[in-house]
Amino acid sequence: MTAKSAAAAAGATVHGYPRQGPNRELKKAVEGYWKGRVTAEALRQTAKDLRAANWRQLAENGIHEVPTGDFSYYDHMLDAGVMVGAIPERHREAVAADTLAGYFAMARGTQDVAPLEMTKWFDTNYHYLVPELGPDTVFAADAGKQVAELKEALALGLAGRPVLVGPVTYLLLAKPAPGVAADFEPLSLLERLLPVYAELLADLRAAGAAWIQLDEPALVQDRTPQELAAAERAYRELGGLTDRPKLLVASYFDRLGDALPMLAKAPVDGLAVDFTEAAAANLDALAAAGGLPGKRLVAGVVNGRNIWINDLEKSLTTLGTLLGLAGRVDVSASCSLLHVPLDVKAERDIDPEVLRWLSFARQKTAEIATLAKGLAHGTDAIGAELAANRADLASRTDSALTHDPAVRARAAAVTEAETRRSPSYAERTTAQRAHLGLPLLPTTTIGSFPQTTELRTARADLRAGRIGPDAYEERIKTEIRDVLAFQEKAGIDVLVHGEPERNDMVQYFAEQLTGYLATQHGWVQSYGTRYVRPPILAGDLSRPEPMTVRWTRYAQSLTERPVKGMLTGPVTMLAWSFVRDDQPLGDTARQVALALRDEVGDLEAAGTSVIQVDEPALRETLPLRAADRDVYLAWATEAFRLTTAGVRPDTQIHTHMCYAEFGDIVQAIDDLDADVISLEAARSHMQVAHELAGHGYPREAGPGVYDIHSPRVPGADEATALLRKGLEAIPPERLWVNPDCGLKTRGWPETRASLENLVTAARTVRGELPDSTS
């Protein structure tokens, strides 16, 4: 290909961009609206200003075509439901009365109406709201949001490309609505949904859209022949429309497999393909399919999910190969940049040497533009950038931060015996019940209690030097005393100290482990207005000193009831960090497990009889393709056992998981060999309890009866009904009573009322059991 034709082929674009703003302006505006301090109009104006700033920033960095419609007040899957008119029956009145208030009611619920279920977006830590569909669902096109945002971009003189969740992914991620038979297949509604998409495409073309992106990440998962046939039918029909913009079908997170040749042959105008997560597989499949002659290929060669700088020369090699496989090649990130922080330049406390290795959303767009320039005009046009990139990559490879011989030697010496707990669960449980003396249906919480404004202010004051360590510690002690006193008064059986000293369940530990770096402004959306700052795992990891023992020991000194020690497990430490990409994840997990094993041993030595090691990310990190799962689950479950297997038989090990689909990892949950597991179950109506029972899970379990991601307070009767449903699957001697997740994001009034109702429900159901005493 000549330089001239390459120039015509190479553009720069992205699938999506972080929504929150440099100072989380969107979070503040939305939460202000919820509290009545921000008007709907002011919220809409803040959102509009943020969109404009994002697009201008992208254009300044050299992005030729900006995404529109990816911006969301809460969640893009919820937006897709509104776009196709799939409003649950219980929310229709609220949406009709006030579209914005009704939108948030679907996301968060109200005191009288439950929200949509929430779960993880593929193998990321982003949570989406699950569509509820049934045979009576009637779809109706509403292109208002998409059209308005496209026009905003066009008014700025920018080329905008609307981004829509594709119809196949939308249906494959949906669930049967409440009251609909569990075997109902939402994909059966495809023929009903496609005319709605046809109408949306026509509306967007009329508004000025030249291209539309239809996201179909569900096609990188294992799909049945029937599902692939449905996707082929969908894009044959949509591609055959005459009144439409050009169609770009986007996939990401893994290899497309059998879906790639199907999409390559479909009458669409382009494909966006991930060449980072499964570069070789997608490249081979594209070549085998005959490429995309005459079509556009958006090549995702910059990792949209991690924060390490791109190897520009390696990416250019991939792009050069792709030039011969498509009519036009554009450069992009592998997926939406929603999954990374906004701007490295905001960080002031990270060593400048290390900052050279990092690339957040804004830096990634610059990398994309550089690669597009190099592809179009040759490497001489970006010679200075390539030289600087080589130096930055070498700096990371050669750094002492990345290699600790003592850590590597210890990890290499781990034996099989260190990853197996003895004796068996059947023997351990007898010792634990005798030691703990708990009633049937014991009550507990997951760990955290509300992080009040006073607590956050105290932490900020300590960092700023406005208060000293002694004053801060007294504030933490007061909070622990208050949390313990409330739990004892409420009648909770196994207590927690509430974690007032912890800023985040991963960052708190990362700040005390070698090899980790913390950011000050590296915020990433987890769900709604919940943003986290994933720490950066840059090098070999160890624990210099105990991390939790002091506060757990203090809490236990205040009560005769058992207080759980609370740790974050090795897989979650990796999944909720930006993890190093220069060694296998299993090797890194073993290093984390050994550090946590030391902490577990110190907690037990300090008198802690119940230790919870949270692994909410075990399911989230499960590879999207079944062929890749056995290897992952082997090292993931081994890491958990390495963390926990060194304790006495009468020390009870708990774990916790939330907001994911657990049915396909029940065997792995069993392989963890924890004594008790607590799981999300309130929004899914105890589905997980029946999945555990169907597997024959032999240990104790606490399927949650209180949905903590909604501000509504579940009544005692509601919790009682859920407990009774749980008892249909799990016998009373193995059933625990707890919320779905930690209470950090909730306020104290709703927390008190909900936990009191939870205890009332446990006592009510205990009283219904044969020979039970309350």
Image (cartoon, grey):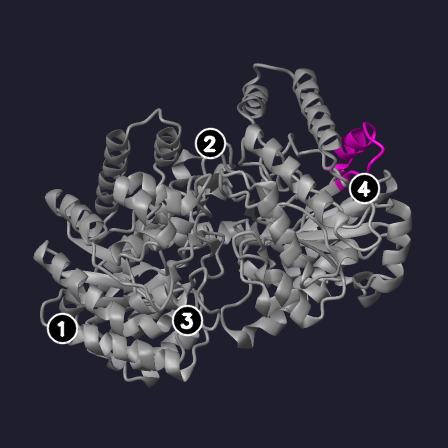
Report whether residue 741 is seen.
no
Q: Residues within 10 Å of mark 1 (few under 14, many from 20)?
A: some
Magenta range? 546-564
Q: CA distance from mark 3 to mark 4?
A: 43 Å
Q: Quadrant of the C terminus?
A: top right
Marks 2 and 4, Cα distance to the nearest angstrom?
35 Å
In the rendered image, residue 97 lying in the magenta stretch gets the answer no
Q: Which residue is mark 2?
A: 348
Vertically, is 696 above or below 106? below
Q: Nearer the viewer, residue 641 or 302?
A: 641
Residue 316 in picture, x, y percent from top left: 33, 65
Percent coordinates x, y for residue 578 in the rendering: 52, 50
**Image marks 1 and 4: residues in contact by CB distance under 8 Å:** no
**Residue at the location (44% across, 72% down)?**
221
Label 4, on which residue?
Answer: 603
Q: Which mark is residue 255?
A: none
Residue 675: x, y in percent? 78, 57
Residue topped by disc 3: 220
Q: Which mark is residue 241?
A: 1
Residue 351, visible in the rendered structure: yes
For marks 3 and 1 on the same chain, the one whose residue lies earlier in the sequence? 3
Element type at mark 3: helix
Task: Classify residue 8 as left or right of residue 191.
Answer: left
